[in-house]
Amino acid sequence: MSAIRQDAWSDEDDLILAELTLRHIREGSTQLSAFEEVGERIGRTAAACGFRWNSFVRKKYEAAIQIAKAQRQKRTQQKKHAPVSISGASSIGLLESSELAVNKNEGFTEETLSIDAVIRFLRQWKTTYQDMNRHIKSLEKELQEKEEELDRLGRENNKLNKQVNEVETDYRVVNDDYKALIQIMDRARKMAFLVEEEEEEKPRFKMDANGNLERVE
């Protein structure tokens, strides 16, 4: 048995579903039989095919469905006018009495299904529904983990921004102190230079042997 696919439906899958379902309608078969054949063809359950047909594909082929039903009706009328043996008529009667009409809201309008086919379809639909629930729960858990990770990263980002602001503040303080120190050192150099100039400009005297002061050039 082929593996059951869980991926998204492609345009080709939808086309196969539409073609086979229309053929079954046209030939007087049940839609469930069509869904089972499609499922075997593309690797999906009949329930998944039925859900896809009723929820999306059917709306795109309303005109084609009406044409297929008209062809089926014409074929049925031709069969009615054809001679039927007694044994053949009895077989048809037994077959019709063993089939169950399914409500239109279930997506099988004007089709008859055997009880076994309905049970098989419901079981497959239950499996598909359970798989979908598990997948949804897995996605919800993954989403919650992503949200928690996003919240954690947000807190870390706020913490880093606070640290950056503190570093920028410290840098501005240090930079201002450095500029002030440079200005102080510059003024100190200028003052030292002026003092040296004043010292050089002052007249110098020395005493000679007679006790007289004379200026030193």
Image: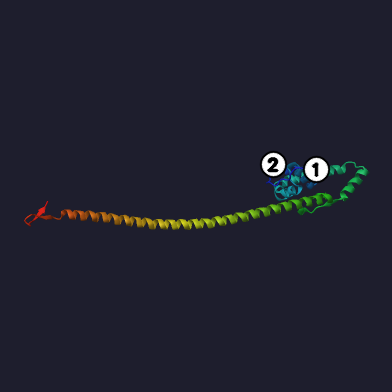
Q: Residue at position x 67%, y 53% from top?
A: 138
Asked if disc 2 and disc 1 are in contact, CB closer than 8 Å, the reply is no
* Residue 7 image position (x, y, % from top left): 68, 46
What kind of residue is marked 2?
Answer: Glu
What kind of residue is marked 1?
Answer: Glu
Q: Name the residue beneath numbered marker 1.
A: 27
Compared with 19, 109 (above or below) is: below
Q: Who is closer to the viewer here, 120 or 27?
A: 120
Q: Quadrant of residue 146?
A: bottom right
Q: Name the residue beneath numbered marker 2.
A: 12
Question: Can you tell which mark lies on residue 106?
Answer: none
Q: Secondary structure at mark 1?
A: helix
Q: Residue at position x 38%, y 56% from top?
A: 174
Residues at marks 2 and 1, CA–CA distance in whole angstroms: 23 Å
- Disc with the residue nearer the chain's start (2 vs 1): 2
Do we see residue 108 in this rendering? no
Q: Who is closer to the viewer here, 179 or 46?
A: 179
**Tag count in the figure?**
2
State the quadrant of the N terminus. Answer: top right
Do we see residue 79 in this rendering? yes
Closer to the observer: label 2 or label 1?
Answer: 2
Q: Residue furthest right?
A: 86
* Residue 192 image position (x, y, % from top left): 24, 55
Q: Secondary structure at mark 2?
A: helix
Q: Quadrant of residue 211?
A: bottom left
* Residue 179 image position (x, y, % from top left): 33, 55
Q: Residues within 10 Å of mark 2 (few under 14, many from 20)?
A: few
Locate residue 199 relative to residue 28 in the image: left or right.
left
Q: Residue at position x 79%, y 45% from top?
A: 33
Q: Residue furthest left?
A: 210
* Residue 66 image position (x, y, % from top left): 75, 46
